[in-house]
Every structure is written in structure tokens, then in C-alpha cells.
Amino acid sequence: MKVVLLGSGNVATHLGKALKENHHTILQVWSRSEENAKELGAQLSAEGISSYDLLNPNADIYIISVPDTAIEGVSESFPFKSKLLVHTSGTTGIEVLEKASDKIGVFYPLQTFSKQRAVNFEIVPIAIEARTSEIESTLKELASSISETTVTFDSEKRKALHVAAVFACNFSNHFYTIANGILKDSGLDFGLLRPLIAETSLKVQSFFPHEVQTGPAVRNDQITVNKHLEFLKGKAELEELYKLISQNIINFHQKS
Amino acid sequence: MKVVLLGSGNVATHLGKALKENHHTILQVWSRSEENAKELGAQLSAEGISSYDLLNPNADIYIISVPDTAIEGVSESFPFKSKLLVHTSGTTGIEVLEKASDKIGVFYPLQTFSKQRAVNFEIVPIAIEARTSEIESTLKELASSISETTVTFDSEKRKALHVAAVFACNFSNHFYTIANGILKDSGLDFGLLRPLIAETSLKVQSFFPHEVQTGPAVRNDQITVNKHLEFLKGKAELEELYKLISQNIINFHQKS
């Protein structure tokens, strides 16, 4: 397919690379910043532009991949009323695109994208949503060409998936950051935790997480919990988080 | 070395297997429950006992691997005052063993151990502590025979390591559980999150976690954060956690 990307951030970058590698043609990269558009355009053998007037009308699909707060603004300026227009957001509903085009959809790749690291798109689930079955077929075909897992969800289910992903990925990663801070304060190296972090995520590849929960809270070992709270004294935010999550673990596992 | 294990839980099981595989001899497994002692004993080609009177006096090391709350009780009943006695706890100090023997130490393997899953001990860091340099050498030798990473930490540093591990592993795993609950409530499958969880942990194998943080909070995208809080309405505990951790992410990344 011939694709125009509107956006030049992490999702646009990795999605654009995956599309290009799988023999789609990226005609253009549009970005508010001409510099960013040209930079990503160069990587994707595409033209980089920052004006809506320069948008090529001959693409099969236009993919808006910008921060959620900017989707509506970009779609309001989108000039082609009968062209297939999608966004890549987990939480934004499909309806935000309604005024922009008659052919709309969502193409949400569920992964954590960082500039520094290549992504294997084959294992990235793509949640699509479409207003017609024809659009759904088109999006499924595009998704299947880069990923092994395509699902069709409405906006509410996609939001549930995104909220779940925030807990499983963004919050977990922040806890790695907190752990790194605790280690640094004691002069210890983050490398010590890397095998533990790897194993924690490997375990849930074949089990459900509640089946393999470990640590003082799930054992209801209040003596260790209290020693850890004592250790965290003076770091009020960490103390509060430790207390709250430990209690949440205890509540969950006592119920189940 | 000739080893006696006091304990039959997850740590004792996986440590015992690693020692046996690396050509140490497990003479006995002691447990309060004779059944558990005999069961693990059978796996390790060792005698299973539940009486302190039957402890074999000819081992080179006696390893107490029981819940933290039980370490003191077991050590009080340990009959050999001049035999090398260690525990495997992250948070319990070395001094808890002082009354039990003249030769004491700690042998703390930093990993999440579940009965259901084999562990590659080679990559498990082992934090040791010893009262004399002679004991330290012995423990280092034992640790090096099963793991590539041995560090010597005092009880305070070991506690820091354990607290950090609770955030990075136990709390992260509980967030996988929370994510699974959110998916289930919407009729979605946990399998959708597995590639994301894997990638999140893989990223920090080569980067620091703050370098690869993603999601609405680090972008300070309050619109998405608020939509997620709206989605979690009625689940007070999750709402509170979401709010608190998002604010913590914002605070951390604005400071840095």
C-alpha cells in the first residue's frame, strides 16, 4: 500500500520502518516540525513535509500518529474527505476522526516504542477498529502484513487494553526506575537487578501473574514489610507506594 | 561441599537443585513438615527429616532457607555451635544467627523462585556476608560454583537490594495481575500483553529504565491520564494507584 504518515515520534518511526520493511511505500512523512519530517522521511525513503497543502492525494491510507492531544487538531486540517484516515491511539475513540473523512479507522500497535531500540513488529498485537467492513478488511490486511496478531476491538475495549498496558508496562518500568534509585542511594549497581527483571517477565509468558507472585506481601510477611517501610522512612512517596501496593497484593491473594 | 538444607520452600528447592547439579552433595533436607522434607529430599537424593536430633553433624555448611519469620526459631534449635550456618534472606541481618553458631554468614540469591518453573542459577546474583574472611572465602567458592555473579554486601546493603527487588519484581508482577484483571473485565485475553511485558523488561537489559520510560504520564498527557482515571471509576484502589504512580512518574521526570 501507499502510505502517508502524519507524525514523526516513536510510534510513527517504528511503524513506518515496519511498513517499509514489508514492502509498503511511505510516500510522505508530515510533521509540524519540518526538520523532524525530513529526518524520518530520509529514513523511510519518503518526502518530509510540514504543510498540509503539500500532502500527496494518492496514498491508500493516511496514518495520524501524534500525541493524543494533537490528533483532533491534525485531523481538522486533513484535506481529503474521502481518503482512508486512521489514528494509532489506544485511548482516543474512533469518532475524533469523523469530521475529517468519510473513511475512518484505528490502527493501534500495542508496544512500548523507544527511539533507541529496534522493534520486532511481528509479535506486536495490532488492535484495529473500522466504520465499515470494507475498511476493516483493508486494515486487517495491512496489519497482517507486519504483525502475526491482529484483533478487532471497539474504542472501549481498546481503552481497556491501553489502561492494562499502562499498569503492565509504564508503571512496571517506573518501578525499575525506583529500584535503580534505591540501589544508587546505597552505592549499588542496577545490573544486579537485570536477571531478576528478565525472569519476572519470562515467568508470565507461560503462567498467569497471580500464579507466580512472590515476595513478602503475598506471604503476608508483616515483619519484612515493616522492615522495608522502616528502610524507606524519609522517602514519603516510596513509603506510601510500598504500603499501598503491598496491601493491594495481600487483599487480592486473600480473596482468591 | 556437603550441604544440609533447613527448609523446603521455593528457595530451598531451587538452590538445592543448583547445588546438586554442580556436584555438591545434599546430605539432608530438614523441614518442620516431614512430608515436605521427604519430598524435596527425594528430588535431591538426600535424606528427609523433621527432627533436629537427626541432623547429620558432618556437613560443611548448613543452609537455613525458611520464611524470614521462622529463621530465628530454626537457628535457636540448631545443635552444632561450631558448624558453618547461613541463611538465605535478603532482609534479615546476619546477627540473627549469632547465638546459634560461631561460624555464620548469609547466602542470598537474588531471584524470583516459583515451584512451577526451573531457574538458571548461573545468572542469579548471590549476595554473601560473612563474619570472618575464612567464611567469606568458603561462601564465595560455593556461590561461584553455581553462579557467575557473587557480591559481598553487609546486611544494610543487602536490605537495599531486597527492597529494590520488591519494586522491580514483586510489584511489577502484581501490576501484571492488575492488568490481567482489567482485561478480563472487558473480556480480553492476557496473551495480548505478553509481548509488551517481554519488551519492557528487554529494554532495560541494555538501557536504564528512566531512559526508556513511555506512556501518558511521562509525556504529562493529562487528557489521557484523566480518561484512564474515568475508566477506572468505581475501582477505588486502582484509581488511587494510577493517580499516585502517574504523579510519581511526572515528578521524577520533571526533576531530571
Image (spheres, coloured by chain):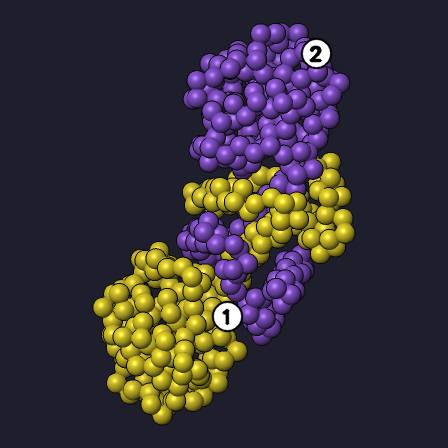
Chain colours: A yellow, B purple
Q: Mark 2 against mark 1, which lies toward the viewer?
A: 2
Residue at image location 76% in from the left, 48% down from the top: A233
Disc 1 residue crowd, few under 14, some 14–19, many 20+, Cα 10 Å: many
* B114 displayed left or right of A216: left
- Residue A85 point in image, percent of width and height: 36, 80
Mark 1 — residue? A91
Q: Nearer the viewer, residue B127 or B48?
A: B127
Residue at image location 46% in from the left, 71% down from the top: A89
- Residue A174 point in image, percent of width and height: 57, 56
Q: CA distance from mark 2 to mark 1?
A: 64 Å
Mark 2 — residue? B81
> Can residue B31 be seen by looking at this rendering?
no
* A105 displayed left or right of A246: left
Which amino acid, by three-letter code, is at mark 1?
A: Thr
* B191 displayed left or right of A42: right
- Residue B102 point in image, percent of width and height: 70, 16
Chain of the residue that carries numbered disc 1 in the rendered image:
A
Which amino acid, by three-letter code, is at mark 2?
A: Lys
Look at the image and tell me in which quarter the C terminus of chain A lies. top right
> Do discs 2 and 1 belong to a common subunit?
no
Residue at image location 61% in from the left, 64% down from the top: B256
**Residue that protrudes farthest toward the front in the picture:** B133
> Can residue A119 be seen by looking at this rendering?
yes
Q: Quick check: B58 above or below A28?
A: above
Q: Quick check: A117 above or below B65?
A: below
Disc 2 residue crowd, few under 14, some 14–19, many 20+, Cα 10 Å: few
Q: Quick check: A107 above or below A243?
A: below
- Residue A143 point in image, percent of width and height: 31, 66
Chain of the residue that carries numbered disc 2 in the rendered image:
B
Q: In the rendered image, which quarter is residue A130 located in?
A: bottom left
**Residue that protrudes farthest toward the bottom in the picture:** A53
